[in-house]
Amino acid sequence: MSQATESDVREDGVIESVSGPVVTAVDLDAKMNDVVYVGEEGLMGEVIEIEGNLTTIQVYEETSGISPGQPVEGTGAPLSVDLGPGMLDSIYDGVQRPLPVLEEEMNSAFLDRGVDAPGIDLERTWEFEPTVEEGDEVGPTDIVGTVPETESIDHKVMVPPDYEGGEVVTVESGSYTVEDTVVELDSGEEVTMHQEWPVRQQRPTEEKETPTKPLISGQRVLDGLFPIAKGGTAAIPGPFGSGKTVTQHQLAKWADADIVIYVGCGERGNEMTEVIDDFPELEDPKTGHPLMSRTCLIANTSNMPVAARESCVYTGITIAEYFRDMGYDVALMADSTSRWAEAMREISARLEEMPGEEGYPAYLAARLAQFYERAGYFRNVNGTEGSVSVIGAVSPPGGDFSEPVTQNTLRIVKCFWALDADLAESRHFPSINWNDSYSLYRDQLDPWFEDEVAGDWAEQRQWAIDTLDEEAELQEIVQLVGEDALPEDQQLTLEVARYLREAWLQQNAFHDVDTYCEPAKTYQMLGAIKTFNDEATEALDAGVPVEEIKDIDAAPRLNRINVQEDYEEYVDELESEISDQLRALY
């Protein structure tokens, strides 16, 4: 959260009433969304309603002890984030206060109210290397230099979007703090490494383009059946314990994005503690450096003030847009948007607004759309191309997908990864239900898969989908009359579908090899199962009983492809064995 100087802060209001995190003040000279400091302790809040002389403020901290008559100080500026080197490998709360810095200051993991600190270290020096020379013309968001922010990422210093630009007058490499001037323009503007940007305002771009490259996740069920594009949007709804958080952790670890922004919005404290403890220990598979060197964590747990939860997703998406402007592909994980919506519902109720469905505010759908629409594959103002992919977990009460947050999210996102409690209970992970899930990106991503992986990628995937669909229909009959009552060709379909489920769609997140599966391996595993299907069908047509086909020694080895590092040789041998053993039966 950007800091207001003493000259910016002025006492010009008095508290009239307090209702939880919602405070009303009179005689306050402020605009909508301005940041204010409330009470004797200076608790940070945001103006959310103005009616005559009465101003309503949502406070981002616990308001116990605040009483009418205490002062309110305005800053005249909206809620903004500090942007600059130092954001990666950081852990923030919902309004970008750096938690490790505050913990050190307080000498405690429990923070006092009213404590604050800049989002980035204003005193640390960085090695600035210019990419422009004196006399060059630069405009808004143009890159003027680079800073090695972490082992993995070069931070690109840009002209702020709200500058006019002009001709470079002075520029020099060297060590600077984020507030030192690194470039002077003939317009009189001075460029530093530090920017501020209002979190509720989208950063400008040149054009939003149709995404055509997949965000490779390394998860077979996603890459194989329900791919997401770089710059795409996805929702992961599921009941308690179905694996939403683990799925997002996997995506954060393995997705081929340059930068990962992980927003823990209202999740349990022990889950966020696990993320905060695990991520610094994880190695980035691409670079060998710590994964945190390209990650920014925003932790707003369920016991933190509800108002800060409402702003944390905006903080995350604004940081993501900043890195997108540098030309990076950014993946933002929001876990979970249901907690965000519940925070909106609580604030709305305290404002006595007219409730919509299930008590959520009438503007729930609009807020969700505003958030997800900030995702996309963009041509930036400075000529670079970058993307923000948003993957939001949804926690419908009781796993009821008909509730308002899930339904309104479904209208916006193009990927729906439906988690299933029954699959989770049967230890099938990821527990993504292949019958309920979908991806609307398939057609636009198929050319990439066909060029980079295999020409018949779409054809193989469609065969898998058809087989799984047929199995779902047959299972209804099996439950009535048993599998033995089915014709032999349908019994074979059930056997092939079982291998699709157990060997291909299941994946062990805790196995060193199986935790990540590249698209080529995903394709070859599916190809091996299809080879078994094709050879078995021929054997069946030749009169071989289905029980003999099921009993061949090679078939169970399909379940072990996932743990093979040298899978290509293993698959070639296995396909040959399957073919030889089945043909020997007729």
Image (cartoon, rainbow, N blue to C red):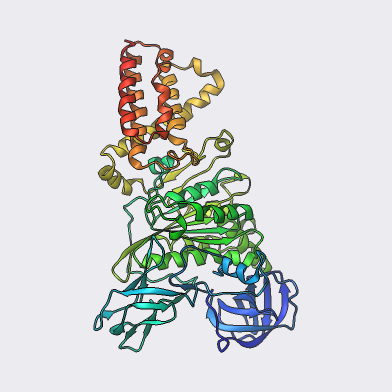
On the image, the x and y values in percent for residue 116 come to 60, 74
Question: Can you see residue 27?
Answer: no
Horizontal relation, residue 183 to residue 371: left or right: left
Residue sitting nearer the eye, 384 or 209: 384
Q: Is residue 476 above or below residue 145?
A: above
Q: Position of residue 182 (x, y in %)?
A: 36, 81
37 displayed left or right of 532: right
Total numbered labels placed on residues in the image = 0
Q: Where is residue 153 drawn, in percent x and y?
A: 38, 62
The image quadrant that residue 554 belongs to is top left
Q: Nearer the viewer, residue 182 or 440?
A: 182
Q: Residue at x 27, y 46 (%)?
A: 447
Residue 513, quarter of picture: top left
> Which quarter of the figure has residue 21?
bottom right
Kindly tell me whether residue 559 is visible in this rendering. yes
Q: Nearer the viewer, residue 99 or 34?
A: 99
User: Which corner quadrant holds the C terminus?
Assistant: top left
Residue at horizontal 33 percent and vertical 20 percent from the top = 577
Taking the view exactly as shown, the residue that stands out farthest to the left is 135
Closer to us: 41 or 202: 41
Give the x, y percent position of residue 140. 34, 77
The N terminus is located in which quarter? bottom right
Residue 210 is left or right of residue 551, and the answer is left
Q: Is residue 38 above or below residue 252?
A: below
